Each structure stands twice: as C-alpha cells, then as structure tokens.
Image (cartoon, rainbow, N blue to C red):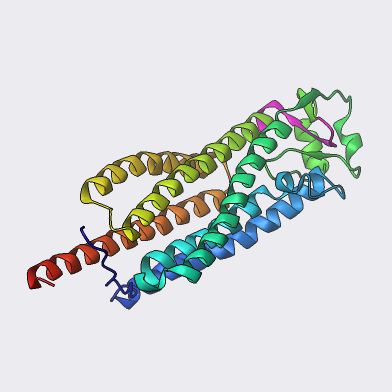
C-alpha cells in the first residue's frame, strides 16, 4: 500500500455466541493457570522443601510462570488484533503494550529455561538400593508417580516398588523405578518441545502484527506464514496427543485450549487484514 490506512475498528465478531465461546476459552485458560500453580506448589514442596529461592523459583514454578505469561500475552494479542482500533495503537499505548509484552517474553523464555533445568533434575539419577521399601512408609521419602507428582510412600506403593530396580533423584529424597523415571523424562522433553515451538509461533505472529500495523502484510506473506505456522501447530498437536496418552488430562486439556485460543488470534489477524484491504480498495475506487 502506498499510504497508511487505519480504518479497522476491531469490533468483536458480530455473532455473540462466537464471542462468548472465544472468551469462555480464555477464561478456562486462566483457570488452568490456577490449577498449574497448585500442581507446582505441591511438587516444589516435595522437590525443594523450604529451599525455594529466587535462584531456583523457575525450576519450582516453571509451569505457573509459563502459563501466566502466556495468558497475559494472549490477552495482548486479542487487544491488538480484535479490540483496540488501529489509530489508538500509537505512541503511549503502543509503548505500554510493548513494555508488558517484553516482560511476558522475558518470563516465557525464563520458563523455557526452567523446563530445561527440570529435565536436568529429573535425569540426574543415582542408584537407590534398599532391602525393604516399606520401611520408608511414614518417612520424608517420596516416589515418582509422574513428572510433577511425587507422593509419599504408602503401603500400596511400597508393595508395588518392592524388588524393582530403583533410582534416586540426586540431591532429593525422591526415588522411582525405571519406568516411572523414563516417563517423567519423556514428559520433560515434551515440555521443552512444546515451549520452544510456541516461542517460534509467537515470533511469527508478532511479525505479522508488526507488518499489518505498517501496512506491509501481503497475501503472499500470509500464505507463507500459514504453512510455516501450520507445521509448528502440528508439532503442538503431537505434544497434546502425547500428553493425552502419557501425561495428565490437565496437560492435554490445556494444550488443546491453547491451540483453540490461537486459532482465534489467527482469525483476528486474517479479518483485520481483510478489512484493511477492503478499506484501501474502497479508497482507491473513490479516488481519495
């Protein structure tokens, strides 16, 4: 386009049911963030005890930090692509949104680092030899049930673990059998893959939003972006499917909701681009 046009008012979708569904998904993601915080709180109590400090808080609360930052970032995308008119996305408001976004990206990258650290923790294993596992019932020892689930030893667990090859997570009073620890390791890898893939997707989305605001986003660029992001969304679907079979329902459900939420953002960008294009064509026809 030869001149900047800002006629897109970004009013919510005309169908109220669609709008209600979209914001219901956003609210469910906020609730999931609270559930992840509860999980991190319990897991960190077993892994770190009273030793959680600013130095290891990213290891203890990586999922909570990641989810909270992504929720804020999602809302920023929604505001920019579907709520705030283009002419208001200038100067003070523009810099305010950029500042909040920068904080979100810092914590998202920080959380990605935390997932990598968590992988290092869960794979730093030592042989654990004990003749009677049931002697640990009522002690401070816990066993690995899942990546973020380390319950205390009870009568049922000690019978199950008795006689198996056991390993201890170095520096902790947590141990588990080979199968549970391999499952936790694989889930840690999926966490890293999922977090890294989302980082790539959001960079591509940021590029599209920036080009749209500069009126340089073309159909060709959008087509290339669609296929490129499609590949990464497919990777995210693979992660969600893996969680559905090997992880917790919360992980699967949260991954699914995030995919749906960003489909809405993709739709916002497409509608935004189409309306600006139509406004430009109408302006050209009227000769203004």
Task: Answer above or below: position of 186 versus 278.
Answer: above
Of 163 and 269, the residue lying toward us: 269
Image-based side of 254 in relation to 50, left or right: left
Image-based side of 279 in relation to 244, left or right: left
Magenta region, residue range: 170-180
- The image quadrant where one finds the C terminus is bottom left
In which quarter of the view is residue 154 placed?
A: top right
Of 71 and 7, the residue lying toward us: 7
Q: Position of residue 158 (x, y in %)?
A: 81, 36
Q: Is residue 172 magenta?
A: yes
Task: Answer above or below: position of 171 versus 36.
Answer: above
In which quarter of the view is residue 150 placed?
A: top right
Residue at (27, 49) in percent of width and height: 222
Task: Answer above or below: position of 111 versus 173.
Answer: below
Image-based side of 176 in relation to 228, left or right: right
Q: Position of residue 220 (x, y in %)?
A: 22, 46
Residue at (24, 65) in percent of width and height: 276
What number of labels is visible?
Answer: 0
Task: Answer above or below: position of 204 versus 262.
Answer: above
Residue at (86, 32) in percent of width and height: 133
- The image quadrant where one finds the N terminus is bottom left
Q: Position of residue 123 (x, y in %)?
A: 70, 28
């Amino acid at each position: 386009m030869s001149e900047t046009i800002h006629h897109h008012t970004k009013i919510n979708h005309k169908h109220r049911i669609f709008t209600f569904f979209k914001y219901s998904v956003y609210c469910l993601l906020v609730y999931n963030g609270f559930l992840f915080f509860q999980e991190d709180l319990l897991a960190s109590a077993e892994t770190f005890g009273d030793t959680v400090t600013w130095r290891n808080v990213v290891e203890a609360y990586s999922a909570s930090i990641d989810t909270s930052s992504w929720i804020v970032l999602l809302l920023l995308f929604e505001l920019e692509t579907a709520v705030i008119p283009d002419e208001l996305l200038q100067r003070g408001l523009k810099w305010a949104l950029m500042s909040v976004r920068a904080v979100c990206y810092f914590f998202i990258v920080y959380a990605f680092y935390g997932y990598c650290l968590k992988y290092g923790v869960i794979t730093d294993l030592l042989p654990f030899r004990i003749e009677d596992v049931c002697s640990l019932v009522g002690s401070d020892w816990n066993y690995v049930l899942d990546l973020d689930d380390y319950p205390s030893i009870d009568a049922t667990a000690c019978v199950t673990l008795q006689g198996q090859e056991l390993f201890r997570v170095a520096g902790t009073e947590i141990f588990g059998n080979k199968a549970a620890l391999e499952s936790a390791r694989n889930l840690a890898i999926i966490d890293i893959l999922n977090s890294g893939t989302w980082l790539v997707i959001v960079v591509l989305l940021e590029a599209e939003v920036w080009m749209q605001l500069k009126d340089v986003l073309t159909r060709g660029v959008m087509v290339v972006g669609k296929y490129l992001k499609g590949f990464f969304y497919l990777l995210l679907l693979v992660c969600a499917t893996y969680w559905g079979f090997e992880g917790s329902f919360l992980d699967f459900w949260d991954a699914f909701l995030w995919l749906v939420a960003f489909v809405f953002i993709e739709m916002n960008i497409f509608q935004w681009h189409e309306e600006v294009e139509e406004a430009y064509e109408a302006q050209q026809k009227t000769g203004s």
